[in-house]
Amino acid sequence: MSSNSNQQNLNIIGSTEYVEIAGIKNIPAKIDTGADSSAIWASGINMQKDGKLVFFLFDPKSPHYNGRPLEFLSYKAKVVRSAHGDTQIRYQVKLPIRLGDKTFETNFTLANRSRNSFPVLIGRHTIDDGDFLVDVSKSKVSRQKKAFTNHLNRELEEDPYKFHQKYIKLKGVK
């Protein structure tokens, strides 16, 4: 089979997508071909004495939080290295996902993603599991950061000194 016919069997997704995970719909996700594994924002992660892992997807500040605890007897531990070189030990669970037109189960590490732009990160193994091809020219989720960056650059153009005083000098960045 040629590589072109292999590509025809692939599901094409963009660099950002809306996904459904564990019945929660319209979750913005970043597709990251540089990440090995997928991660999802989890809170209240707790291990019961009987070995049951209990947690919530997202947290009460998230619009995706439903307050329903998830319980797992089957899970793994995984060492995850960030792009900055930091390592963390995280729990890993299998969750159902709908990505593009495909529904399947894949592994997610549980992480506090409250400070990330996307509550879900989809890594290479999930992309491989679903036979996806990432077209970086496509993006389903609009990025608010880009609009804010454009606003910042307009302020910078209008008055560089005032911009510096407002955002750089007074914030302790030198």
Image: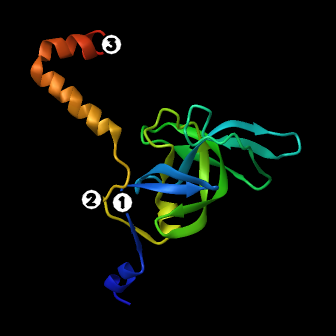
Mark 2 highlights which residue? 137
First-in-chain label (3 vs 1): 1
First-in-chain label (2 vs 3): 2
Indicate left or right for 24 with 115 as reference.
Answer: right
Q: What amino acid is labelled 1 in the image?
A: Gly
Instruction: Determine if residue 149 is in view.
Output: yes
Q: Are marks 2 and 1 in contact (CB under 8 Å)?
A: yes
| Residue at 57% in and 46% down | 40
Classify 129 as above or below 118. Answer: below
* Quarter of the figure with the C terminus: top left
| Depth check, front residue: 40 or 139 | 139
Real-space Cα distance between discs 2 and 1? 7 Å
Residue at the bottom extreme of this rendering: 1
Rendered image coloring scheme: rainbow
Point out the frontmost of discs 2 and 3: 2
| Residue at 37% in and 81% down | 8
Which secondary structure lies at badge 1?
loop
| Mark 1 Cα shell of 10 Å, populated few (<14), some (14-19), many (≥20) | some
Q: What amino acid is labelled 2 in the image?
A: Ser
First-in-chain label (2 vs 1): 1
Q: Are marks 2 and 3 in contact (CB under 8 Å)?
A: no
Q: What amino acid is labelled 3 in the image?
A: Lys
Mark 1 highlights which residue? 14
Which secondary structure lies at badge 3?
loop
Q: Which label was assigned to residue 171? A: 3
